[in-house]
């Protein structure tokens, strides 16, 4: 009989933990370097600048507006993609992901071209029409910031809502319909209340994504101080004039905001949405 | 009361052809058959949740083939119950009346009536998560019966229950049958259930309905 040998799990934890800790250490080192580079006085002095205070206000406002718009679009679109099979569904599902994979500068350039492309004999331009006929110019103004942030944030919100709706048992909406609900009532009274945490998660992710947006904003909205300046462009502006202390201080502020958002996200328990697990495909 | 006329279903590899069925008012019919033979599909067609490829569905002398599920006067208990996780037991029993905009007084009276019939009055304030299998079954049954439907459709309602709870639920279904006389189509795999509950027992075999 072969003697019983005691086998250790230590190599498992050493290999897995060693590989995992490389990334964690990298992030910690990045943050530590930023903190070591700047001082509290630099941070306070940067925050006291009127341009930075204006940038913080515009950032909070634009991120909030774009996140709200993103959720308003993401909820119905993700629900339709989750519940129905229709011609062109795969194409729409793919198009939704394009802002996630497109280089940020290309996205900004595409927005700029969309608003300034002359059409037809009259050379009609969307931006000219908005400026002259509607009185609501977009390019190089604050609406351009919101639109640039929304374009990317919405894609993230749609994916988050898609996962949420996929986890909700569609049969509860079927039962609601047998009880007299229209499809709209089944959605608003049965599906949407179950998706509550997912909606909050989608809003948070969209807000955080909008906060980090830079390339499309630079191209489509510009980086005019006190006018189209958000925190991500503030970092670039401070860096470009050689004020590295302010650039790092603003970066740290963004890190703090990002940590707060991510902690809020964890707190909401997005990985355990608290909804009934879907049994998947219908049985027959 | 219920008439399925030459129903054909074609969905991928699965198909049922020219299936016809008649169930008389107050009759309790049990439908049996192998897994995947089309029992649930048939219930979904009766509910209006699935469109047949061809054929017609009649309930109470009306062709309801193109009616929406909510206009068919049916109560439906799916196999997984599909309770609403964000609602309490009381809200389940009130749901159908609230959707129809009934008065608060009427909703309360109907809720109490249904809760008493199913012996779940003590559960009314409870959320549905944390209910036992038998309690959840009673809530799903109560939700389906709240509107006093003309037809009750049960999809393997006792399949996930232990033996003792199954016996209790069988007794409850018998008492509901006697109290409401609702026309019922009950899908099951268990011949014991069929023997205790059915006025008539049908089986789907090779795509055809066979009387047992």
Image (cartoon, rainbow, N blue to C red):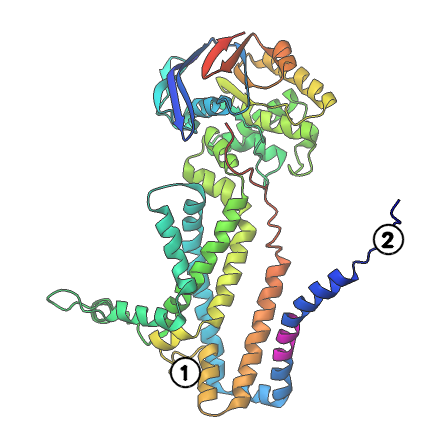
- In the picture, measured across the screen, residue B54 lies left or right of residue A234, that is left
Work out whether A22 lies above or below A280.
below
Q: Residue B172, position in %: x, y? A: 66, 18
Query: Tag 1: Cα neighbours inside 10 Å, few (<14), some, or many (≥20)?
Result: some
| Residue occupying image coordinates x 36% and y 79% | A222
Residue at label 2? A5
Same chain, labels 2 and 1: yes
Badge 1 marks a residue whose secondary structure is: loop
The quadrant of the picture occupied by the N terminus of chain B is top left
Query: Tag 2: Cα neighbours inside 10 Å, few (<14), some, or many (≥20)?
Result: few
Q: Residue A36, position in %: x, y? A: 64, 86
Work out whether B3 lies above or below A5.
above
Q: Please, what is the dominant secondary structure of the magenta stretch?
A: helix
Q: Nearer the viewer, mark 2 or mark 1?
A: 2
* Image mark for residue B81: none
Let me know if residue A154 is in the magenta part.
no
Looking at the picture, tell me which residue is in the foreground, A282 or A156: A282
| Residue occupying image coordinates x 44% and y 80% | A233
Give the letter of the chain under mark 2.
Answer: A
Q: Residue A3, position in %: x, y? A: 89, 49
Q: Which residues are magenta?
A: A24-31
Q: Quadrant of residue A168?
A: top right
Q: Quadrant of residue A151?
A: bottom left
* Image mark for residue A226: 1
Looking at the picture, tell me which residue is in the foreground, A156 or B102: A156
Which residue is most to the bottom? A242
| Residue occupying image coordinates x 63% and y 15% | B193
| Residue occupying image coordinates x 49% and y 65% | A207
Q: CA distance from mark 2 to mark 1?
A: 71 Å
Which residue is most to the left? A121
Looking at the picture, tell me which residue is in the foreground, B177 or A83: A83
- In the picture, measured across the screen, residue B48 lies left or right of residue A47, that is left
């Amino acid at each position: 009989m072969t003697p019983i040998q005691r086998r250790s799990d230590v190599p498992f934890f050493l290999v897995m933990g060693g590989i995992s800790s490389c990334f964690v250490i990298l992030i910690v080192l990045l943050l530590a370097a930023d903190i070591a580079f700047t001082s509290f006085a630099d941070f306070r002095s940067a925050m006291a600048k009127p341009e930075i205070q204006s940038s913080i206000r515009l950032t909070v406002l634009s991120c909030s507006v774009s996140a709200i718009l993103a959720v308003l679009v993401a909820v119905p679109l993700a629900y339709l993609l989750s519940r129905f099979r229709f011609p062109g569904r795969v194409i729409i599902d793919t198009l939704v992901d394009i802002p996630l994979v497109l280089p940020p500068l290309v996205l900004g350039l595409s927005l700029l071209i969309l608003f300034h492309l002359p059409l037809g004999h009259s050379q009609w331009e969307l931006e000219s029409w908005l400026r002259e006929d509607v009185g609501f110019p977009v390019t190089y103004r604050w609406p351009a910031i919101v639109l640039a942030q929304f374009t990317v944030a919405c894609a993230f919100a749609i994916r988050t809502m898609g996962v949420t709706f996929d986890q909700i048992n569609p049969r509860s909406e079927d039962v609601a319909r047998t009880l007299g609900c229209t499809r709209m009532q089944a959605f608003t009274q049965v599906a949407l209340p179950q998706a509550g945490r997912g909606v909050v998660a989608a809003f948070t992710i969209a807000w955080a994504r909008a906060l980090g947006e830079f390339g499309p904003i630079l191209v489509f909205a510009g980086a005019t101080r006190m006018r189209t300046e958000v925190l991500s462009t503030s970092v670039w502006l401070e860096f470009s004039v050689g004020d590295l202390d302010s650039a790092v201080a603003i970066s740290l502020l963004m890190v703090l905001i990002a940590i707060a958002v991510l902690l809020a996200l964890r707190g909401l328990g997005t990985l355990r949405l608290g909804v009934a697990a879907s049994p998947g495909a219908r049985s027959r | 009361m219920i008439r399925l006329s030459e129903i054909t279903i074609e969905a991928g590899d699965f198909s049922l052809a020219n299936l016809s069925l008649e169930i008389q008012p107050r009759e309790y019919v049990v439908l049996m058959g192998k897994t995947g033979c089309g029992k649930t599909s048939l219930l979904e067609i009766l509910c209006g949740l699935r469109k047949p490829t061809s054929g017609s569905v009649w309930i109470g002398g009306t062709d309801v083939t193109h009616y929406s599920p909510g206009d068919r006067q049916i109560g439906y208990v799916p196999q997984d119950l599909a309770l609403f996780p964000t609602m309490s037991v009381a809200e389940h029993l009130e749901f159908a009346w609230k959707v129809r905009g009934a008065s608060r007084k009427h909703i309360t009276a109907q809720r109490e009536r249904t809760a008493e019939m199913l012996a779940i009055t003590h559960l009314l304030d409870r959320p549905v998560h944390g209910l036992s299998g038998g309690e959840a079954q009673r809530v799903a049954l109560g939700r389906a019966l709240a509107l006093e439907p003309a037809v009750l459709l049960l999809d393997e309602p006792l399949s996930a229950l232990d033996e003792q709870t199954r016996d209790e639920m069988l007794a409850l279904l018998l008492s509901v049958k006697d109290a409401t006389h609702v026309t019922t189509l009950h899908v099951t795999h268990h011949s014991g259930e069929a023997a205790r509950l059915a006025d008539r027992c049908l089986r789907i075999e090779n795509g055809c309905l066979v009387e047992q």
